Amino acid sequence: MSNSLHWFFNSDTQEYESLRRKTEETLHSAILEAEAGNWEAVIEAGLNCPLIMDDILKAYYPSLPERMRYTLPLKWYMGAGKASKTVCDAVKCAVKYKPANWLGKGLVKGDWIEVYCALRSGNSEEAKACLSWCTNYTGAYITAQKINGKIYKGQILKENILAFDESCLEGVIQYNSVYAVQQIYPVLPLSACK
């Protein structure tokens, strides 16, 4: 088992031993699939067992085909819930490999789109570096309520969006492409935004 998984498995309980064994088996299987170039199976393995994502990315990201350098980290980022630093770093690298003809589904508001994000703490510069934004206030509001956070809004060009995730209240994934970021204060209730 790789070193990056050891932090998680420091218990002798049967449940942890079973999880450790399952993770090792999944990682081994994903390595075999990666060696065979079967990247869709690797993506699926990572979504089923997020603990293997860091090891796969560290070992294989530099040798991935260009289309997978874009696809793999974005699918893992969107499917993992809370992504690790390694996955987030790979999403930032994915900017270089975005297909030229990519455009998010349903984005018909014009060249510039207003987006929103919620942060527990920080300022507008830290908000700008946030990878996940929403195209509607509701998504940011719900997140801010969960984390007792602040809401920021900004503008992004359609072509600078890396991915569009309809499953998370019209979420967009971006890297360092949101402009005119400012905090919405006070946080407006949803009824005031209709």
Image: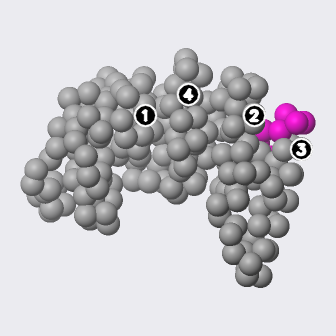
User: Residue 63: percent from the left, percent from the top?
Assistant: 76, 26
Query: How many discs mark residues in the rendered view?
Result: 4
In the rendered image, residue 136, in percent from the top left (x then y), is placed at 29, 47
Quarter of the image with the N terminus in it: bottom right
Q: Which residues are magenta?
A: 34-41
**Which element type, helix, strand or loop, lies under badge 2?**
helix
Task: Work out whether 164 lies above or below 7.
Answer: above
**Looking at the rendered structure, which numbered label has been put on residue 93?**
4
Q: Is 78 located above or below residue 95 in the figure?
A: below
Q: CA distance from mark 2 to mark 1?
A: 23 Å
How far apart marks 3 and 4 lie (CA) works out to 24 Å
Residue at image mark 3: 32
Kindly indicate the quadrant of the structure image that contains residue 194: bottom left
Q: Closer to the N terminus: mark 4 or mark 1?
A: 4
Q: Which residue is mark 1?
A: 174
Q: CA distance from mark 4 to mark 1?
A: 11 Å
Q: Earlier in the sequence, mark 1 or mark 3?
A: 3
At label 2, the amino acid type is Tyr
Give the foreground label among 4 and 1. 4
The tag earlier along the polypeptide, 3 or 4, is: 3
Depth check, mark 1 against mark 3: the one in front is 3
Q: Secondary structure at mark 1?
A: loop
Q: Give the residue at mark 2.
A: 60
* Distance CA(mark 1)–CA(mark 3): 31 Å
Is 83 positioned to the left or the right of 108 in the image?
A: right
Amino acid beneath label 3: Leu
Please name the predominant secondary structure of the magenta segment in the image. Answer: helix
Distance CA(mark 2)–CA(mark 4): 14 Å
